[in-house]
Amino acid sequence: MTRIRYAFLTALTFVGISSSHLIGGAMAQGATTALLAQPMSLPDMALGDAKAPATIFEFASMTCPHCAAFEQNDFPMLRSKYIDTGKVRYVFREFPLDIKAASASVLARCIANGDAEKFFAAIDTIFKLQDPLMAHTRETMLAIGKAAGLDDKGVENCVSDQATMDKLSADETFAAQKLRVKATPTFFINGKMVEGAMSFEEFEAKLKPLLKK
């Protein structure tokens, strides 16, 4: 062991931090990052530069009021300051809490047809209409689909697509079992889990140290 490394370890011990704790935490975070990078059954819907220094994964349900509040109040600022400027890559993954959320997720996928911008626009609309979606699900989904260019039959065919539903379920199971996601919203910032809603200011406080590296 070099003299410098010995001094460093001694200092860590003095302040109550063991090297094994730091190394173990870094390894766990690295393992989580690797799990997040695995291809899912459904293609990721992502915004921002794939080579950005920070990556945020959000696990959300279309029927989660905290997710809707974040989408409406905080996400626009996060996008304009960090995502659109190339500092953050943002990946949205569905974690439906009920069948209505699952159906809305599948509808957003149909509307997007693989286009991330269209997907984020669709979920923005869904979150804005969350209350009527809960109260009058079919009518609201038909209206959302119609606004996006789908007729009633197209919407019905979309939300009854069992193959997509099965993939959505498989991805949710992976998130629950491998990533220990239990509730929405859950975020991973460079592999570190943060559970529950966060304000833009809280996001910014977590991002700034990562962007200085």
Image (tube, rainbow, N blue to C red):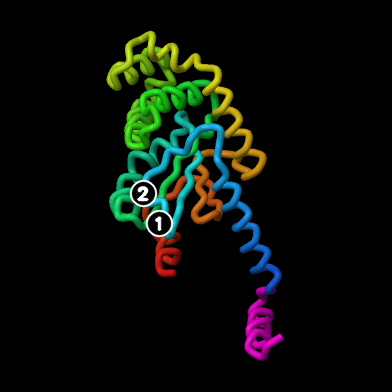
Q: Amino acid at mark 2?
A: Gly
At which x and y percent is residue 99? 53, 21
| Residue 173 magenta | no
Q: Quick check: 67 above or below 135?
A: below
Q: Are marks 1 and 2 in contact (CB under 8 Å)?
A: yes
* Residue 62 picture quarter: top left
Q: From the image, which quarter does the C terminus lie in?
A: bottom left
Query: As drawn, is 95 to the left or to the right of 179?
Result: left
> Element under label 2?
loop
Q: Residue at x 38, y 18 (%)?
A: 141
Q: From the image, which quarter does the N terminus lie in?
A: bottom right
Mark 1 surroundings within 10 Å by alpha-carbon count, few (fewer than 14), some (14 through 19), many (20 or more): some
Q: Amino acid at mark 1?
A: Ala
Q: Residue at x 67, y 76 (%)?
A: 16
Span colored in magenta: 1-18
User: Which residue is at the front of the view, 192 or 163?
Assistant: 163
Residue reaching furthest top? Answer: 153
Mark 2 surroundings within 10 Å by alpha-carbon count, few (fewer than 14), some (14 through 19), many (20 or more): some
Give the main secondary structure of the magenta stretch: helix
- On the question of residue 60 being in view, the answer is no
At which x and y percent is residue 49? 37, 51
Q: Which residue is mark 1?
A: 52
Residue reaching furthest bottom? Answer: 3
Query: As drawn, is 180 to the left or to the right of 58?
Result: right
Q: Quick check: 155 above or below 94?
A: above
Q: Which residue is mark 2?
A: 48
* Residue 152 picture quarter: top left
Q: Residue at x 46, y 50 (%)?
A: 56
State the separation of the CA atoms marked 1 and 2.
7 Å
User: Which residue is at the front of the view, 197 or 77?
Assistant: 77
